[in-house]
């Protein structure tokens, strides 16, 4: 497969979302500029890490550049849902953040998951966005995650609708009794 190297500078829109039923959802990051829309598959844990990392990253930026105004990050739900085409270019292996202080733009750098992990062979997509867009993405990402399976208060793992194998309860499934 040929290497992809795309940079949307700056994006008109950046979002994350999940499609499918809780427990079998597929997570996406999607950015658009003009008539170009780029969708990539990400893992739930990558979305969780990104949502948390954005807050820490923006805090670091505001400490380094105190003259910057605080981003609003207003969420309009209808604008945050992914839109067709959802044909993902690749599955993300690594995701990172960078900041260009001259242009006051943040970059989400998504690198393809590759079996051989040869850095030179991996495709990359760069989504350049404003700090406001990044805050909105983080807030929306947390909402997307919360829409999944409920978290077990005992073990902090997602609970399946058909029952939950909880290690803290010695493996007993919620709502079921063992007969022996």
Image (cartoon, rainbow, N blue to C red):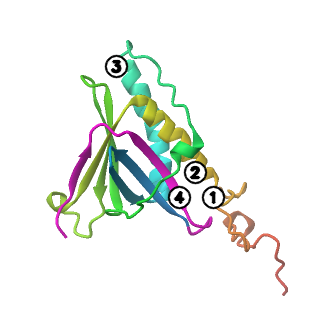
- Taking the spot 31% from the left edge, 25% from the top edge, the residue there is 104
Asked whether 51 falls inside the magenta stretch, the response is: no
In primary-sequence order, the first of circles 4 and 3 is: 4
Asked whether 21 falls inside the magenta stretch, the response is: yes
- Taking the spot 28% from the left edge, 55% from the top edge, the residue there is 111
Q: Which residue is mark 1?
A: 148
Q: Nearer the viewer, mark 3 or mark 1?
A: 1
For label 1, the crowd category at 10 Å Cα-Cα, with few meaning under 14, some 14 to 19 and many 20 or more, is some
Q: Which residue is mark 2?
A: 144
In primary-sequence order, the first of circles 1 and 4 is: 4
Q: Nearer the viewer, mark 1 or mark 4?
A: 4
Q: How far apart are labels 1 and 2 at the CA level? A: 7 Å
- Taking the spot 38% from the left edge, 47% from the top edge, the residue there is 31
For label 2, the crowd category at 10 Å Cα-Cα, with few meaning under 14, some 14 to 19 and many 20 or more, is some
Q: On the rendered structure, is 42 left or right of 124?
A: right
Q: Which residues are magenta?
A: 1-24
- Check residue 125 in the rendering and tell me which mark sits there, or answer none: none
Quadrant of the rendering where the C terminus is positioned: bottom right
Q: How far apart are labels 4 and 3 at the CA level? A: 34 Å
> Dot 1: what SS?
loop
Q: How far apart are labels 1 and 4 at the CA level? A: 9 Å
Q: In the figure, residue 150 lies in which quadrant?
A: bottom right
Q: How far apart are labels 3 and 1 at the CA level? A: 36 Å
Q: How far apart are labels 4 and 2 at the CA level? A: 7 Å
Residue 2 percent coordinates (x, y): 16, 66
> Dot 3: what SS?
helix
> Dot 2: what SS?
helix
User: Farthest left residue?
Assistant: 120
Q: Which residue is mark 4?
A: 18
In primary-sequence order, the first of circles 4 and 2 is: 4
């Amino acid at each position: 497969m040929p290497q992809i190297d795309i940079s949307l500078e700056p994006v008109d829109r950046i979002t994350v979302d999940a499609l499918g039923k809780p427990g079998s959802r597929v997570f996406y990051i999607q950015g658009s500029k003009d008539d170009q829309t780029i969708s990539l598959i990400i893992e739930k844990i990558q979305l969780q890490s990104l949502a948390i990392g954005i807050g820490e990253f923006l805090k670091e930026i505001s400490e380094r550049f105190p003259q910057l105004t605080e981003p609003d990050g207003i969420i309009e739900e209808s604008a945050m849902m992914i839109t067709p085409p959802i044909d993902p270019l690749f599955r993300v292996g690594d995701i990172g953040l960078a900041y260009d202080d001259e242009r006051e733009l943040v970059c989400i750098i998504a690198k393809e998951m590759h079996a051989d992990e040869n850095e030179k062979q991996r495709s990359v997509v760069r989504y350049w966005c404003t700090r406001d867009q990044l805050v909105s993405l983080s807030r929306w990402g947390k909402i997307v995650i919360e829409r999944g399976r409920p978290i077990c208060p005992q073990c902090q793992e997602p609970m399946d609708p058909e029952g939950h194998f909880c290690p803290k309860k010695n493996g007993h499934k919620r709502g079921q009794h063992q007969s022996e």
